[in-house]
Amino acid sequence: MCRLKPVIINRRRGIFKNCRYLPEIMFLYLRYAKYLEDDFTDRKGSFLASFTDLVERLSPFFWAVVDKEDRLAGFIYLENFTGSGKTLYSAEINTCFNKKYWGNFTYLTGVIFLNYCRDALGLRKLKAVIYRENFRVKTLLKKLGFQKEALHPAETVKNGKLQDIEEWGFITERNCNYEN
């Protein structure tokens, strides 16, 4: 079973929570950056500085996903919110998991996280934006109940080549239940 641990950085207030996972999270991010970035990814200065800035900007919506032995399995974060003030309507979900956790673990994490987004955060819709060739993530999204909403041809550039992007959506009222 997975646990979600919020990773919070607020340098101004001196708040640092669950930052012990950051080195592993950064390593995991770099390992799978080809699925997470395009040629327009803005890195100001070092990777360490830009990644720390990312986590701080997204706090409190960045989580380390750990297994029952408290080992890092992956991370999840939310960004690009729609809503105002304390009322959030939708957000874009981004995830990355260590390969040894792919499969049932990532699926169960997805079920837990989608229900958390609905019940604790009050989100009514989640979006996932993926590269068209990322079949593993598409399979997981379908199993979780996401539906393909759009194809954006030549939406971005990756490694100097035009790249199609798919947009997938999940409406939280549909419920995400565990299925064998």
Image (cartoon, rainbow, N blue to C red):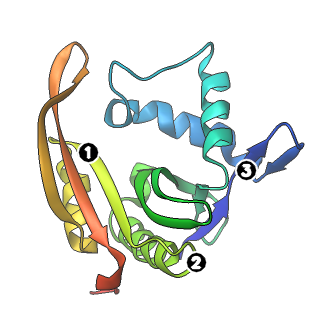
Task: Determine the CA span between mark 2 and mark 1.
Answer: 25 Å
Which residue position holds label 3? 8
Give the residue displayed 28% in from the left and 73% down from the top. 144
Q: Amino acid at mark 2?
A: Ala
Q: Of label 3 and label 2, which has the lower sequence position?
A: 3
Look at the image and tell me whether residue 169 can be seen.
Answer: yes
> x%, y% of residue 141?
25, 63
3 and 2 marks in contact (CB < 8 Å): no
Alpha-carbon neighbours of circle 2 within 10 Å: few (<14), some, or many (≥20)? few
Look at the image and tell me whether residue 175 can be seen.
Answer: no
Residue 149 relative to residue 61: left or right: left
When asked about the image quadrant of residue 130, the answer is top left
User: In the figure, 118 relative to 12: above or below?
Assistant: below
Q: What kind of element bears circle 2? A: loop
Q: What kind of element bears circle 3? A: strand
Q: Of label 2 and label 1, which has the lower sequence position?
A: 2
Give the residue displayed 60% in from the left and 62% down from the top. 66
Residue 1 relative to residue 20: left or right: left
Q: What kind of element bears circle 1? A: strand
What label does residue 130 carry, if any?
Answer: 1
What label does residue 96 carry, if any?
Answer: none
1 and 3 marks in contact (CB < 8 Å): no
When asked about the image quadrant of residue 169, the answer is bottom left
Task: Determine the CA span between mark 3 and mark 2.
Answer: 17 Å
Front one among 32 and 160: 160
Front one among 159 and 68: 159
What label does residue 120 carry, if any?
Answer: 2
